Image (spheres, rainbow, N blue to C red):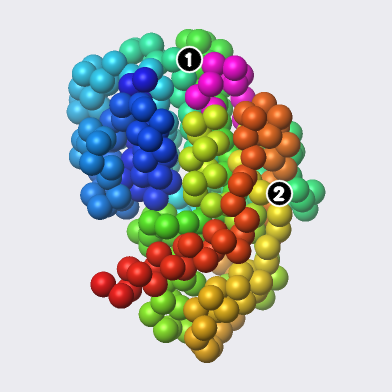
Amino acid sequence: MNILVTGGAGFIGSHLTDELILTGHHVTIVDNLSTGTMKNVNDQAEFHNIDILDKEKLAAVFDQGHFDIVFHEAAQTMVPYSMDHPVEDAELNIMGLLNVLENCRRYHIKKVIFSSSAAVYGDNQKVPIKESEPLKPMSFYGLTKITAERYLQLYYENFNLPYVVLRYSNVYGERQGSHGEGGVVFVFSKALAQGKDLTIYGDGEQSRDFIYVKDISQANIAAMSENVPCGIYNISTKIETTINALKEILVYFAGTAVQTTYEDARTGDIFRSALDNSNAIEVLKWHPKTKLMPGLMATYAYFQEEESH
């Protein structure tokens, strides 16, 4: 199939592109390289250095591409940035999405697969959280993801544009970067590879549901199937891991004695998070294959290798 991946030079988008090409699809990438990088781009993919806010250039890509499926990964993904820059966050995550959806409608795309987030649930204590739980975002980032989901639902109801929303838990893995696609695994791995001390915001007992990026790619590919109905699916491991436990694992891999400083928790950060992945397992016929220890080991080895060059 002909497939468009927005944000395909980024962390998750580039891994997804690699998997799509391995399975025989022709992939076109749209990315403005604000957070992504050309070294992530598969050399078999067609690449366009375009901002999704540029209506004319984006429309030209759709006009030439004859796409069957669109994966929308391009986004502002940093919670702290969204709290400091709510306008910029909304411009990219909502107006950028609308530019993509308008082209999907115009060019009769068969399905849009959208990357959402655990941030939509806020600090819900009913862990692991089901998709049916109330949505109470604590950040503008989470709010834009909810808004985007609603747009997708209305485009389907009004224009018959099929969609699948995948709510990712905390994704980690090789290629994760500091510029817009960072995360605590990246921050700790990078610091340890450089022999630097660590900082934890809060007491470290806050939990996250860490999922390996290649499992995320497989969930996206599973969502392409015609047998998968329109809807929202948590993509997660269903397992809570505290930040303190994560630190201990990565420090063990690094074999380096470093100091850990604890600072005040950041505005918008969730305390407990783990998502129920039962629907994804049942409907998408997908399940996470990578356990935390080998996933973290591969990730740390990647950053260690990066630092050695």
Query: Badge 1 local density, few (<14 within 10 Å), some, or many (20+)?
Result: many
Residue wearing tag 2: 238
Q: Quadrant of residue 146?
A: top right
* Amino acid bearing label 1: Leu
229 part of magenta stretch: yes
User: Which of these two is toward me, 39 or 209?
Assistant: 39
Q: Is residue 86 visible?
A: no
For the point 32% across and 73% down, the residue is: 307
Majority secondary structure of magenta residues: loop
Q: Quadrant of residue 269?
A: bottom right
Give residue 111's position: percent from left, percent from top.
Answer: 46, 19
Image quarter of the C terminus: bottom left
Real-space Cα distance between discs 1 and 2?
A: 30 Å
User: Which of these two is toward me, 287 or 191?
Assistant: 287
For the point 71% across and 54% down, the residue is: 239
User: Which of these two is toward me, 20 or 228?
Assistant: 20
Residue 126 shown left or right of residue 120 in the figure: right
Residue 199 shown left or right of residue 98 in the figure: right
Residue 255 shown left or right of residue 278 in the figure: left
Residue range highlighted in magenta: 223-232
Give residue 15's position: percent from left, percent from top.
Answer: 40, 45
**Helix, strand or loop status at disc 2:** loop
N-terminal label among 1 and 2:
1
